[in-house]
Amino acid sequence: MEDSKMKRYFTILACAAVAFAGCQNLNTVPEFEESESFASFPTATFGVNENVGQLVIPVSIASIKPVKTVVSYEIIDGTAKSGVNFRDTNPDAVLSFDGETREQNIVLDILELPGEYTGDLGFSIKLTSATGLKISAENNCGITIFDLDHPLAAILGTYTGTAVDVGGDVVWELTLAKDAKDVNVLWCDGICPLHASNKSSLSPVYANVTKGEDGSFTLSFPCGQEVGEYNDNGMLELAECYIVDGGYMVNFSSSLIFTQTATGFESEYGMGLVNDYLYYNGFLLGKRTDPSYKVVWTKK
């Protein structure tokens, strides 16, 4: 009887040991298989100014340990052309990994065309093969070369805006950016802050740009451009605001004119983001007793 009990006891222990071992196997961290090693671009996009000189693009090997391999790639022209806008310093288009490192670089000379406006240009690089390895899904890299000869380059950038609101002095930041297609248009992402929250406008507004005989620029922002809804009280619209005989006027049919100064731009009149709910408050109005009210943008 005792022998029978003892056998059952050892049988239970053996089963428990097998079950425990099975649980241990379930919790084992899976290992990266060497056969799954691959080559890839760590970064899918690059953007550089045309005067950068050289662009270095890394190619990485994902493996348990560094491996010897040869990775081939192909450069695909887009609006940027090989030999015109860039040149590969490695004419064989092959990267050799010696088993000591996981990363090699594609090095490109970026060819500047000073004084020639081409617009931003792009091209791409594709990994085509890797000896003994796979090619990752991240096998394409897009490159954009930013043109520095845009006709409006001198006035694009970040500005500090200053003005007088109904609540006092206001200071904010704004950016003038180029249009993707028209070199005579730019966009402002913060033309006017709201008085109540001191936040800039909700959506960018555009200006038509003209250049005078003296070389200075004038910006003309058409009024009536919608910049977003204000607390479900209707759309805010860009408007001209100015003093007349001690009172003020709001004009949606004209354009806000900014003329270039030595340090930035200055408005002809005041301006605001206005709807029926915010007719008296919440927009730049200026001192009611000061007909010379203006908005000043100083380039940073």
Image (spheres, grey):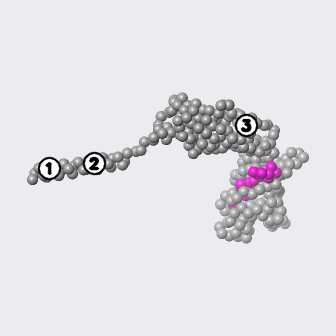
User: Which residue is at 9% across, 53% downward?
Assistant: 1
Q: Nearer the viewer, residue 211 or 29?
A: 29
User: Which residue is at 86% across, 49% downward?
Assistant: 211
The majority secondary structure of the magenta stretch comes to loop
Query: In this picture, which residue range is highlighted in magenta?
Result: 179-194
What's the CA distance linking mark 3 and mark 1? 83 Å
What's the CA distance linking mark 2 and mark 3? 65 Å
Q: Is residue 120 above or below residue 110?
A: below
User: Which residue is at 64% across, 33% downward?
Assistant: 93
Is 180 one of the magenta-colored residues? Answer: yes
Quadrant of the snapshot with the C terminus: top right
Q: Name the spot of residue 16 as percent of width and height, x first.
A: 25, 50
User: Which residue is at 73% across, 41% downward?
Assistant: 80
- The tag on residue 82 is 3
- Amino acid type of the residue that numbered disc 2 sits on in the rendered structure: Val
Q: Is residue 254 left or right of residue 123?
A: right
Q: Is residue 136 visible?
A: yes
Secondary structure of the residue carrying tag 3 is loop
Label 1 crowd (10 A; few <14 / some 14-19 / many >=20): few
Q: Nearer the viewer, residue 147 or 289?
A: 147
Label 3 crowd (10 A; few <14 / some 14-19 / many >=20): some
- Amino acid type of the residue that numbered disc 1 sits on in the rendered structure: Met
Q: Which residue is mark 1?
A: 6
Q: Is residue 279 left or right of residue 66?
A: right
Q: Which residue is mark 2?
A: 18
